[in-house]
Image (tube, helix red, strand yellow):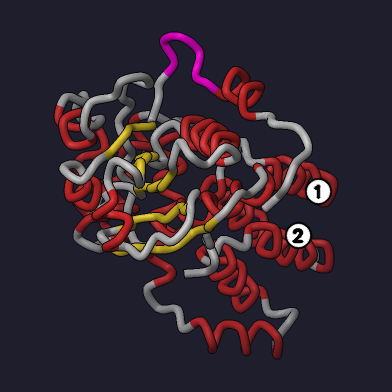
Amino acid sequence: MTDPNFTRPGAVDLSALASAAEAPAAGAASYVVDAGEADFQALVNLSAQHPVIVEFHSARDARGAEVSNVLAAMVNAGEGRFLLARVDVDAAPQIAQQLGVQAVPTVVAIIGGQLAPLFQGTRSREEIQPLLDQVAQLAVANGMTGRAQPVPGAGAPAAGASQEQAPPADPRFAAADEALAAGDYARAVEEFDKLLAATPGDGEVIAGRAQASLLQRSLSFDAKEIVEAAAAHPDDVAVQLDAADLEVIQGEYQAALDRLLGLAAEKSADEREPIRVRILELFEVIGRTDPIVAKARRRLSSLLF
């Protein structure tokens, strides 16, 4: 895993301001739960569907509140890309001991039952966001397309119970999700194509197809060979497309888009077309609203027009 990875001292305590600014509006969806020792296995089980971010915290840590609020705001902004589970190390010391938590805050990700350390100590918003982006991309690269269900923001029930009460997944995606879960990415692409034929322009379907297509291409990837080939053949469109795919899988979005936009600038109109198509597809994988995508879209427009 690329450092999805997952103390900044300050003269002013911003936790109160952060709490007011970051808290979900009344009625807004929240993807944050408090978890204890009885809930932890349920979190591990949920990580087979979507990434679970676990924040170990303590009320004794005065500076940790700001990190907690920023992390919650980012997770809620993801609208189900993650579930954030907060574990109070004073109330659940056995979990902290078992996982070797030595300081608070400590934040880890659980993806498919596997633990990935993210960070320890305080971090800024600018430092946390790339880590969450890489967790999301790693989940996609491993065929994990489920989304967390919203839970009550305050006094949330146990993680397992909240998920059991969640509404069912969109039935339109049942066949595609089944194919993805089976690792049959070619069939998943076919299922998304069927959905697109029925609902052209559906952003959720387009994004799902883009992710499935990337997964299908990645089955034949050898990372070392791709890196070496890209360095040896900078003008080879097919090789550079593979290199950009690999960078996106590794969470290196800016590098991937810079690679393809730079290549497109050097090619004729005919040679540029497959590059344009791939860039648009990667926009969907990264996320249409990502600032990196917005900037790259402007660059692409200037190249084409």
Q: Is residue 44 above or below residue 249?
A: above
Q: Where in the figure is residue 279, as x and y percent of width and height?
A: 63, 54
Closest to the observer, 75 or 263: 75
User: Mark 1 — residue?
Assistant: 299
Quadrant in which the C terminus is drawn? top right
Closest to the observer, 188 or 22: 22
Q: Amino acid at mark 2?
A: Leu
- Residue for point 23% across, 35% down: 159
Q: Residues within 10 Å of mark 2 (few under 14, many from 20)?
A: many
Q: Is residue 186 visible?
A: no
- Span highlighted in magenta in the image: 23-28
- Residue for point 42% across, 55% down: 108
Q: Say whether marks 1 and 2 touch (CB < 8 Å).
A: yes
Q: Which secondary structure dominates the residues rendered in magenta? A: loop
User: Mark 2 — residue?
Assistant: 261
Q: Is residue 146 visible?
A: yes
Magenta stretch contains residue 124: no
